[in-house]
Image (cartoon, rainbow, N blue to C red):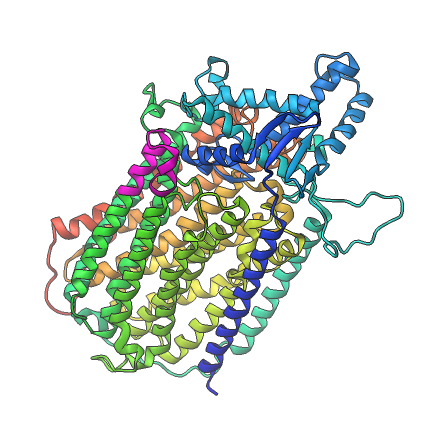
Amino acid sequence: MSSTRKLWIALAILLVSSFAVLLWSGSEIFRAAPPVPERVVTEQGDVIYTKDDIQRGRQVWQSIGGMQLGSIWGHGGYVAPDWSADWLHREAVGVLDLWARADGGAATYAQLPGEERAQLQGRLQEMMRANTYDPSTQTVTLSRDRALAISNVAAHYESLFGNDPATAELREAYAMKNDTIPDADHRRALTAFFWWTAWAAATERPLAEGETLAPEQAGVQPHRVTYTNNWPSEPLIGNRPPPSMWVWSAFSVLFLILGIAVLGWHHAVTHGRGEEEHTIPARDPFAALRITPSMRATAKYFWLVLALFLTQILLGAITAHYQVEGQEAYGFALSDVLPYSITRTWHTQLAVLWIAVAWLGTGLYIAPALSGHEPKFQRFGVNFLFISLIVIVVGSFAGQWFAVMQKMGLENNFWFGHQGWEYADMGRFWQWYLFIGLLLWLTLVGRSLWPILRGDRGADGKASESRHIVALLFLSTVCIGLFFASALMWGEHTHISEVEYWRWWLVHLWVEGFFEVFATAVMALIFTRLGLLKTSTATIAVLFATIVFMAGGVLGTLHHLYFVGTPTSVVALGASFSALEVVPLAYIGFEAYHTYKLGKATPWMVRYKWPIMFFLSVSFWNLIGAGLFGFLINPPLSLYFMQGLNLTPLHGHTALFGVYGMLGIALVLFCMRGLRGQMVWNTGALKLSFWALNIGLALMAALTLLPLGTMQLLAAIEHGYAYARSAEFMQQPIVDLLVWMRVPGDTIFSVGAVALAWFVLRLWIAPRRAEVGDAVVETRDH
């Protein structure tokens, strides 16, 4: 059996077993999820909330932007509080203040002597952590004191989400527009949903038999955890990291070290084995590439990429500015027209959309380039898909604006408005439209690649040799098309724990998983078709790299789900396999050096200098953004304190743009080399773009996100999570200074994006044809 066949079998076994375990983990999460009660009543029988109130409140929350305005269970925006943690803290303080006035003769709990505070805090923990949910009646029963505190906290939120002058200062601090929810009944329903998320975070879940490995000790109360594994950190009710978080965080470090050692041993054993002399072509094989009509039609995809990229940067600047002025932009009441939750929604969605369009365009360009086959009506399909993408972007964004401005109505919001789930915000109708569009893309790429997949030889005779890499490319294309269906797995009233499970299938597996495989295969095909790599060697390397990446990548999805009603067994899996995701990044230097050598392999490779440079930056940010900053927050104990702090977007920005964005730009430039390669490339603009984008991203991370996130982390450990996300903390002068320190990095980054757009624009509006011959069609970079 050949090495290639063995690797295919190993990949198949890995994927089948990994997804089987991932599906089992989902069933465990659904089983352990916090129940939504039919009624919440006092001990005297008075109804506080009903299930309809909670469900209606979630619809209201989603319609105003959901996770884009504050967060729930740590997932969402960073300017407004985490509403679960904020409600929990306010309710706890409210109960303690009631008791202080009734029993201690003090106006507030904080004014009591230390001994009395400790006594009341112990009493509070017993009350708040007790699970009074009755499965037979599906009822939660609460004390009168707690009901009174809930009423007071609800009044605060009804004031905050309305237009009450008493909470105007908080609205500005939270970047909320006035009358975020103009309807009083909707504001009342919203408080029911917020209360339920806080109740789940404070209430100990029933312990399933065998769920804990710790032996019981006589006379000692077993340490139980809440439905959210004691998240968030809240000292008043005894929410602190459970023992399992400490244990599996330590094991995740051990697994990381073991994985690095094993992969290092493999590299030492196999490096250089069986390498044969490989002759590099004297001329660029792609220089004489025949550009088919459908390939030429992909140019508009790359124009759209740049338009979406520039728009995303503008929206990012507006979103960041809201953290300083709250409701205005230099005196203009911007939140009345373009609220924070909308600018952040569009900013985060465009980050995925422009990168995805870059890769979709690359797939449509590279497939006919590899096979030399132009199927019938291929150009029509490319053009139709392009129009569909524009309709999806414009339509979904318009629906989100109408939803957040409360002009759509809850009955239409789920299908056409704002779903409120970060990175899955668009209405269900638009998700179905995008899914169908991805199936069309899959079909267009597949039919172009079909001659290679069935073993036909291309014009250069190399198609069949690269059949295995093309098969992997097509497999990733299939997965990109089909796995977007995970966004269609939840309904309007599906339990939030189940929604989160499927949402991370979309965000982690679709974006971070199969697009990664697609990119790996595309890069290998580019280098083999350029004649820089021997096809058989590249095939084995790509299959092995895919196995290594997917070994941790599939089950690594679970590290996003530690605090959504997840049992300990699933936490253990997430901690273990998310550590393995970082293992291949420890050797990213080998890949970077290999790419650098390929860029210097022959004089004509200067034509591809800047795509190669962007490939090199992918390696750098893979190590920094995905590796260092990723593992910083991945272990359960780390994420317990860091989730939803600015250390999360530190990883998000440096990994999403640093890796996938830079890779998207590299692929765009490679395709541009084919589409406009006969034109002189004035690469001074590309040089400026490359360095400005990388330096700007580094400054953004180093001057703002890292120091601010570290400050929040210390506050969360010392005082609890609610304080680290509070207006009291976030409105400090030092925080304002750190936010303003984003300006240099953001400005430099924007210059890089404009330079890239200018370079591409000039290739069409002011082209200068190169001299015929073998001369390098570039001008100097200096």
Query: Secondary structure of the magenta portion, mostly?
Result: helix
Left or right placement of residue 168 versus residue 777 in this view: right
Q: Which residues are magenta?
A: 395-418
Left or right placement of residue 394 versus residue 317 in this view: left
Left or right placement of residue 452 versus residue 209 in this view: left
Q: Residue at x 51, y 38 (%)?
A: 646
Image coordinates for residue 683, horizontal then vertical, percent? 23, 53
Quadrant in the picture for residue 775: bottom left
Viewer can see residue 724:
no
Q: Residue at x 52, y 32 (%)?
A: 53
Viewer can see residue 63:
yes
Quadrant in the picture for residue 717: top right
Image coordinates for residue 47, horizontal then vertical, percent? 61, 27
Left or right placement of residue 78 versus residue 747 in this view: right
Image coordinates for residue 91, horizontal then vertical, percent? 64, 26
Check residue 396 for magenta coloring: yes
Which is nearer the eye, 656 or 219?
219
Q: How many marks?
A: 0
